[in-house]
Image (cartoon, grey):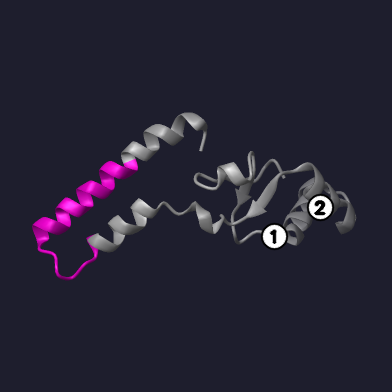
Amino acid sequence: MQSFTCRASHYGRRGAPGHKYLPSDQNVHKMHKLFEAQNHAQTSYSLYYSVFSKDFNLGFGHPATDACSDCAKLKIRMTDPNLTETEKRMESASFILHRRRARVVYDPLGC
């Protein structure tokens, strides 16, 4: 399980401290099969699932609360058909600036 790339939650972190998320195309059954293939060992699914659910603080995909409301608003404004090209560029610049500010905050946290 430690060989999978996990992602930490940004905005929902308070509700689930230390909780990490695996890609949404994964599931415990697929991970169990990969484990058996990589380790050339037969392990019961129930044992694997028990270890997965009790010893690892993992989920799949990311929570719906992981959406920044400012990002959502800026994305909608950038695609507004009533904006001129200059206004669209300004909205795009605002979005890029917002993302850079967010990265400054979250990168030191290991997110």
Residue type beneath disc 1: Asn
Magenta-drawn segment: 78-99
- Of discs 1 and 2, which sits in the foreground? 1
| Secondary structure type for disc 2 | helix
Tell which of 102 and 41 is nearer to you. 102
> What is the secondary structure assignment of the residue under circle 1?
loop
- Quadrant (top left/top right/bottom left/bottom right) for the N terminus: top right
State which quadrant residue 73 falls in: bottom left
Q: Residue at x 71, y 44 (%)?
A: 57
Question: Relative to 71, does residue 17 appear above or below in the rendering?
Answer: above
Decide whether the magenta segment is chiefly helix, strand or loop: helix
Residue 5 visible at all: no
CB atoms at circles 1 and 2 under 8 Å apart? no
Q: Of the residues shown, which amino acid type is indicated by label 2?
A: Glu
Q: Position of residue 87 (x, y in %)?
A: 12, 57
User: Which residue is denoted by mark 1 in the rendering?
Assistant: 27
Q: Report the disc number at residue 36.
A: 2
Most distant residue in the bottom direction? 81
Q: Residue 30 or 62: which is nearer the viewer?
A: 62
Q: Is residue 13 visible?
A: yes
77 relative position to 99: left or right: left
Does the segment drawn in magenta span residue 89? yes
Residue lying furthest front in this view?
15
**In-image side of 2 versus 69 (left or right):** right
Crowd band around label 2 with a 10 angstrom C-alpha radius: few (<14), some (14–19), many (20+)? some
